Image (tube, rainbow, N blue to C red):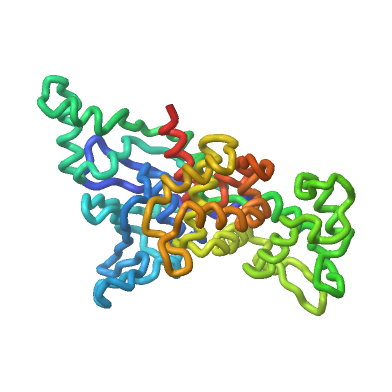
Amino acid sequence: MTVVQTTRLRITMRDVEPRAVRVVDVPAASTLAELHDLLQVALGWTDSHLHMFEVGGTRYGVPDPDWEDELQPQDEATVLLREMPERFEYHYDFGDSWEHTVEVVGVGDEVPGCVEGEGACPPEDCGGAPGYEHMLEVLADPGHEEYEHLREWAGELPVFDQEATSLLVRQTVGEVPASVRIVLDLLAGGVKLTPGGRLPRVVVRAVQERRPEWYSLGRPASIEEDLPALAVLHDILRKVGPARLSRGVLRPTRAARDDLEVVRRLRRWFDPGGYEEMLATTAVALLAASGPLARDELVRRVVLLMGHGWGVGGRPATADDHESSLGWMSAELRALDLLGGGWRTWEAGPSARTLLPRATALAVLLAAEKP
């Protein structure tokens, strides 16, 4: 990861004993939506419930069309961390009502991460601070009438691991996929496209040299379409903004100089919160946690995790929809280094844990559940 300007935050869970505190360095340029992802992994939550930031009576969150106008928060994706005061509140799970105080400590280190911390994160859905206190009391007394039930329900309670948390924070901040860096570097001086608007052969072969697996025929590629992932990546970079065509010449934009901005723009490609993002997130996380999987086995597991409620073409999505959608999305996933392997067996690509924040967190949860 390149050097970024960070802000050091101290996050304290309120009304929780033993104390749960995290001190983390996060990009100073983070939006509150990005900060939400970082707080979730730093604290140990699973992003399974609604959340909101609050300061001085002003609330920031994800706008919901089903809410009354007076209850609508300001869009957290449009507000920057640097615009917040030195102290504000972070609310998570409006049922259990977990409250956190976030304090701006100052300038952080050059690389994001977890500087220090103490205390484990309570389990989700345990009844808030009072329920957590009761659960700990019961688990400390094997003779309690509720002991066996809560022991089975809670499983092994987590412990705070600073090194693992720090890695997860860095992964959630994200990195520019190597595939994107290869193409942007080749475009650095400006590249004149062919009359058909495609990358010239010299660029195609330069990419092929670095990514030979993108062309299965094993001979020198001639046109951009010989490398389907490259053709898709060309389209992605122009549409989300790290590259721009002007007078027939394709070159990186100013945004391409900022790794955080490149990652932010690439993430928008999957329509955050939509079906495609969730499908990609679930598939990538499964591969990152489980290792290579045959396509039919991957689809089976995706169906189980996605559950019901997703729609395609105005109707409920089926297992066949998931499979066909993953099929046509596979070129995008390969282009962004999220997917590797062959056509029948897929595996996680090198960016599987560093591009889609929800995939990063979900992969950790799935890996922890493996026998």
Regarding residue 169, the answer to whether it shows in the image is no
Query: From what the image shows, is residue 272 above or below residue 207?
Result: below
Residue furthest out toward the top: 143
Task: Name the residue located 22 percent from the left edge and 50 percent from the top edge.
Answer: 96
Task: Name the residue located 30 percent from the left edge and 67 percent from the top edge.
Answer: 59
Q: What is the x, y in percent for residue 57?
A: 25, 68
Task: Name the residue located 47 percent from the left edge and 42 percent from the top edge.
Answer: 301
The front one of 194 and 322 is 322
Task: Name the residue located 62 percent from the left edge and 58 percent from the top edge.
Answer: 328
Residue 254 in which image quadrant: bottom right
Which quarter of the rendering shows the C terminus? top left
Regarding residue 161, the answer to whether it shows in the image is yes
Q: What is the x, y in percent for residue 329?
A: 60, 57
The front one of 248 and 333 is 333
Q: What is the x, y in percent for residue 106?
A: 44, 53
Q: What is the x, y in percent for residue 355?
A: 57, 51
Residue furthest out toward the left: 145
Q: In this view, does 334 lie to the left or right of 51?
A: right
Query: From what the image shows, is residue 214 above or below residue 61?
Result: above
Q: In this view, does 22 lie to the left or right of 226?
A: left
Q: How many marks?
A: 0
The front one of 216 and 191 is 216
Q: In this view, does 13 lie to the left or right of 313?
A: left
